[in-house]
Image: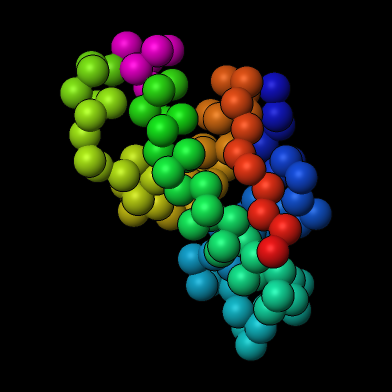
Amino acid sequence: MIPDLLTPYKHYAEETISDTIDGIITPENNDYRPSECTAKRWSHWLMANEDNINGYLKSIGHRLLGFSEELLRAETSLLSELRKKHPTEWLKTVLRTIYNAGAKLDPCYN
């Protein structure tokens, strides 16, 4: 199990990563900020994994939580819904759900 304060394969706290992706942390408003290159890499990492994240969330919801098969076929992005409904905890929820279920996301090094 991954504890809440760790983000797999990252050197920054989950809150810093999610706030940077969401545009809350910018170079102008925070002393503890990642470089612009790192911020772009995180955004690219999220975009590159978006389909995987949605697939994992739907699969885990269906297999482990008993959600209906309609969820698997739905066009709704569970990632987008999480980001809207839980703006401060969406990344933590995604990472814990996926990694603690034994899956993983692809790293993005470019």
In the rendered image, the vertical position of residue 17 relative to residue 54, given as above or below: below
107 relative to 74 in the view: left or right:
right
Q: Residue at x 70, y 44 (%)?
A: 7
Task: Give percent across and percent down for residue 16.
Answer: 65, 61
52 relative to 80 in the view: left or right:
right
89 relative to 106 in the view: left or right:
left
Task: Give percent across and percent down for residue 90.
Answer: 48, 46
Instruction: State which quarter of the image contains the N terminus.
Output: top right
Q: Main secondary structure of the magenta part?
A: helix
Q: Residue at x 28, y 26 (%)?
A: 72
Q: Nearer the viewer, residue 41 or 27?
A: 41
Q: Nearer the viewer, residue 82 or 41?
A: 41
Q: Is residue 33 visible?
A: no
Figure quadrant of residue 108: bottom right
Is residue 78 rendered magenta in the image? Answer: no
Task: Give percent across and percent down for residue 14.
Answer: 65, 51
Q: Most extreme residue toward the right, as rendered?
A: 11
Q: Residue at x 80, y 54 (%)?
A: 11
- Residue bounds of the magenta highlight: 61-66
Q: Residue at x 47, y 39 (%)?
A: 53
Instruction: State which quarter of the image contains the C terminus.
Output: bottom right
Q: Nearer the viewer, residue 99 or 5?
A: 99
In the rendered image, the vertical position of residue 46 relative to residue 19, given as above or below: above
Colour option used: rainbow
39 relative to 75 in the view: left or right:
right
Task: Give percent across and percent down for residue 23.
Answer: 51, 72
